[in-house]
Image (spheres, rainbow, N blue to C red):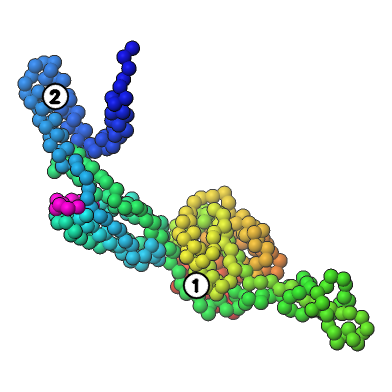
Amino acid sequence: MPRTSPAVAGLGRTLLAARPAALELVTVLGWQVLAAGLGFGIIGALLGWEETITAAAAALALILVAAVFVVGRTSYGVAMDLAKTRVEVGEMAVGSITVSNISARPLLPAAIELPVGSGTASFAVPRLRPEDIHEDLFTIPTAVRSVIKVGPVRSVRADPLRLLSRQVTLTDAVDLFVHPRTVSLAGSAEGLIRDLEGMPTTNLTNADVSFHALRDYVPGDDRRHIHWKTTARTGKLMVRQFEETRRSHLAMALSTNLDEYAAGEDLELAISAAASIGKQAIREQREISVMTQDGRLRTDTARVLLDGMTRLVGAESRTTATDVARLTGDAVPNASVMFLVLGTSVTPGQLRTAAASAPPGVRCFAIRCQAGAALDRRAIGDLTVLTLGELTELPRLLVKAVA
């Protein structure tokens, strides 16, 4: 049996590897022309019709001419730059594409494509002499909270009939975060988010801030807490005892269950309200924990928190706001304030059950979100229930909550 030479085998492997890329060069119209040419060629060969043979030859010639337009290397230096990779809903996102000729010969006009989300923007690049630079600016609509994939920039070389088209990737893709809208709450949460010393509890401890009483010294007590005046008067060692304080830790249970909202815009209002409260808490250097149906969000910085909220996707779920509140209470037993951010479809009974999930001694607030609803405050037992209809009213609502 004859053996294949290493050179022939290597050529075969190269052709097989290049086959997918070669097939991608052919457009839909190109495949139609190839199919028509093949069909005319078969008919002409079987029936001897010169007209169909001529048509087949013309189709092949068109493909060969088209190939001339797509061969060769791309000698562009391309840089894409976004002025900001994080913007708020409604804020203009601006970027630029800079194309330079890094070869030693002039380059013919070409087209540059920039995928943006599910769409694609096209830019015409004029004829560039060596070292010439061409720059294009672009804007990206940011009407909806989302993470938009921008890029990668690619050059497109095609023949005039678009039978063949060759795309070359020139840059990496960049994620553009369109954060939820937020409002400033500076001053609005005074008295609501606890100060750094926290609130005293009924738990007694040997070392804290809030003094409670004196007791007899026992081996192991810190000698720094011995009350020497009382010790001298009574003749036995007495130490100070303190009330344990609860540190300022804000817990937030944000429901993304669409079944609990009257409309999709209500969920966006809820996410914006939660983002505003969380952002303010982080600015004031308060500890904060945020839980959703998808788990716990990172809160290292305000930007990290907003990135996480940008990725949230509302969906119908069997996990309710009550379940998220229970998970939050278990995850943050040392919270001082707990917010339940949810839709208006949650019943008073469910709100009562959700509030019962808060650790003992924690002040609990529920913010019901419905676009256009009137500002309202009411109580269900120890739970303060607030109704929010417009994000700009959130500062007033929080002031009303502690009034």
Q: Is residue 384 left or right of residue 232?
A: left
Q: Nearer the viewer, residue 254 or 120?
A: 120
321 versus 64 height, above or below: below
The residue depicted at 32 percent of the width and 25 percent of the height is 6
Residue at point 29% right, 34% down? 18
Which residue bears the numbered disc 1? 394
CB of mark 1 within 8 Å of CB of mark 2? Answer: no
Disc 2 is placed on an element classified as helix
Up/down of 97 relative to 41, above or below: below
Which secondary structure, mark 1? helix
Which residue is at the front of the view, 198 or 171?
A: 171
In the image, residue 260 sits, relative to residue 53, either above or below, namely below
Circle on res. 317? none
* Residue 376 seen by the camera: no
Q: Quadrant of the C terminus?
A: bottom right
Q: Residue furthest left?
A: 50
- Where residue 70 sits in the image (x, y, percent)? 19, 41
Check disc 2 and give the amino acid type. Answer: Phe
User: How far across and how far down the image is residue 267, in percent?
Assistant: 48, 60
Marks 1 and 2, how far apart at CA: 72 Å
Q: Nearer the viewer, residue 299 or 133?
A: 133
For the record, the magenta segment spans 103-112
Count residues near mark 2 (Cα–Cα under 10 Å), then give few for <14, some for 14-19, many for 20+. many
Say which quadrant the N terminus sits in.
Answer: top left
| Direction from residue 236 to residue 225 in the image, left or right | left
Q: Residue at x 10, y 30 (%)?
A: 58
Report the residue at 23% width, 57% height from top: 99
Q: How many residues crowd mark 1 within 10 Å: few (<14), some (14–19), many (20+)?
A: many
Please indicate, yes or no, whether residue 36 appears anywhere in the rendered image.
Answer: yes
Q: What residue did someone put label 2 on? A: 40
* Nearer to me, 340 or 381: 340
Q: Mark 1 is on which residue type?
A: Leu
